[in-house]
Amino acid sequence: MKLPVKIFLIGFMGSGKSTLAKKLANRINYSFLDLDEEIERIEKRSVAEIFEKEGESYFRELETNLLNKLKTFETNQIIALGGGTPCFNNNMELIHQIGFSVYLKYNSGILANRLLNSKTKRPLIANKNPEELKAFIDFLLQEREQFYLKANLIIEGTNITTKQVIDLLFQNIEQ
Ligand code: S3P
């Protein structure tokens, strides 16, 4: 059985999409792409700076434009999307025109802990204290899960191994 050419990892900030995507790509010999990093490379500035200078809608346009470009690349790729990518501009539809999606699912308590310990700069949660962060995640995850839950495959993130994810991928692809 053959895996889809493009596999998208989706999920909330801090769910480890990029880390898992890199490991998966290594194991199945796909190339790895991180949508945020690619946007930063093209724009020659950080996501935080884009949010600050141009606003969120501009960033959302960049995400959708880049997704559209991926349509034309035939390369086998595992793509880690930003936490908000599936939730704007009908991007879930676009994602499913291009490939297969995997939602890396965690509850808001675990996400809050992971994000409190993360060193990555994320404009949406910068300057929030632990209580504000937890409340914000509760609110935003509830709003976003309707999009994440459209994924082709939903994986509970806690304690999952790369090998288990690969097995699940093979079990869930339709030939
Ligand atoms: C965002 C998540 C970030 C990045 C941007 C906005 C979001 O990506 O795209 O800061 O809206 O959830 P990660 O999920 O990789 O942190």
Image: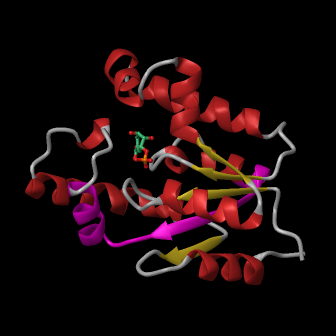
Direction from residue 99 to residue 136 in the image, left or right: left
Which residue is at 53% across, 19% downward? Answer: 43
Direction from residue 56 to residue 72 in the image, left or right: right
Above/below status of 156 relative to 83 = below
Based on the picture, tell me whether residue 88 belongs to the magenta stretch.
no
- The scheme the figure's colours follow is secondary structure
Above/below status of 99 relative to 75 = below
| Residue 174 screen position, x and y as percent | 84, 76
| Residue 30 screen position, x and y as percent | 76, 56
Which residue is at 41% across, 62% downward? Answer: 15
Which residue is at 18% across, 53% downward? Answer: 133
Above/below status of 83 relative to 40 = below
Range shown magenta: 96-116
Based on the picture, tell me whether residue 113 belongs to the magenta stretch.
yes
Q: Is residue 150 visible?
A: no
| Residue 141 screen position, x and y as percent | 35, 60
- Which image quadrant is residue 138 in? bottom left
Which residue is at 48% across, 63% downward? Answer: 146
| Residue 80 screen position, x and y as percent | 57, 51
Question: In the rendered image, which quarter contains the N terminus?
Answer: bottom right
Report the image quarter containing ligand 1.
top left
Direction from residue 143 to residue 65 in the image, left or right: right
- Which image quadrant is residue 96 in? bottom right
Number of numbered callouts drawn? 0
Q: Is residue 68 visible?
A: yes
Question: In the rendered image, which quarter contains the C terminus?
Answer: bottom right
- Which image quadrant is residue 62 in? top right
